[in-house]
Amino acid sequence: MLKIGPYSFQSRLLLGTGKYPNYEIQKNAVEISEAEILTFAVRRMNIFEPSQPNFLELLEPSKYTLLPNTAGAKTAEEAVRIAKLAKASGLCDMIKVEVIGCDKTLLPDPVETLKATEELVKEGFIVLPYTSDDVVLARKLQELGCHAIMPGASPIGSGQGIINPVNLSFIIEQAEVPVIVDAGIGSPADAALAMELGADGVLLNTAVAAAKDPVKMAKAMKLAIEAGRLGFEAGRMKKKRYATASSPKEGMITG
Ligand SMILES: CC(=O)[C@@H](O)[C@H](O)COP(=O)(O)O
């Protein structure tokens, strides 16, 4: 079970809602993934334009928790404003803090992310900051009282997978709140690796939305995350430098 603040979830897969070929494929992908948390950019929500189409209207609302994100914010002030707008619209008190510091890499601005997290925690939000895989920054976000840490595997939408598994494992080792690997996952193998490293969950979007068959990929991601988690819980064997026979001769019963 994944616990974030006061909320509990069976699924450890969190899905983004952008870039799908069409709403029908998106709906089928979301359903087959069995994800319970869907994140979306508040600025794309048409909150104040009810006549505009909105993907979330196609879903059974009781099955999903909406995780608004502050995509588009470049300062803490903007992120806080977006978060308050989402809460005032009655969406959810959880917020994914995303403050981008570089247009080319879409990497987060660490200073503004810290500021926004501090402010939103004080305001009583359930705060999930998107961060780089910086170990010290992750610790500082935790000290500010965030409810989950979301380190990127690699740049958003790049599909490069986990660039620095060592940093990720340090972040996981020191964390007292859930660690959800967010951004850059390209394949089910990447998602399984994140879970095998001990992550509590994976948030992804492009790997499913941009797959040749998004519905099949959504199912593959679900299975990979479950398999990776099981593997983590089972505890992998130690790596050895040399071979060890699978059928050792010692201890054999001889006639
Ligand atoms: C949807 C969302 O929140 C993205 O900003 C997120 O980080 C996913 O990234 P990928 O598209 O690389 O999976």
Image (tube, rainbow, N blue to C red):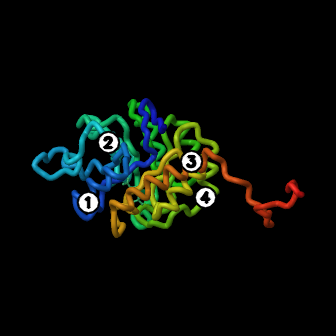
According to the picture, the residue beneath numbered tag 1 turns out to be: 25
Mark 4 or mark 2, which has the lower sequence index?
A: 2
Q: Nearer the viewer, mark 3 or mark 4?
A: 3
Mark 3 or mark 4, which has the lower sequence index?
A: 4
Q: CA distance from mark 4 to mark 1?
A: 32 Å
Ligand 1 within 8 angstroms of badge 4 C-beta = no
Residue 112 in percent (x, y) is at: 44, 48
User: Amino acid under label 2?
Assistant: Leu
Residue 103 in percent (x, y) is at: 39, 64
Q: CA distance from mark 2 to mark 3?
A: 26 Å
According to the picture, the residue beneath numbered tag 2 turns out to be: 66
Crowding at mark 1 (Cα within 10 Å: few <14, some 14-19, many 20+): some
User: Amino acid under label 1?
Assistant: Ile
Q: Mark 1–mark 3 contact, CB under 8 Å?
A: no
Q: Quick check: 115 above or below 218?
A: above
Q: Nearer the viewer, residue 70 or 36?
A: 36
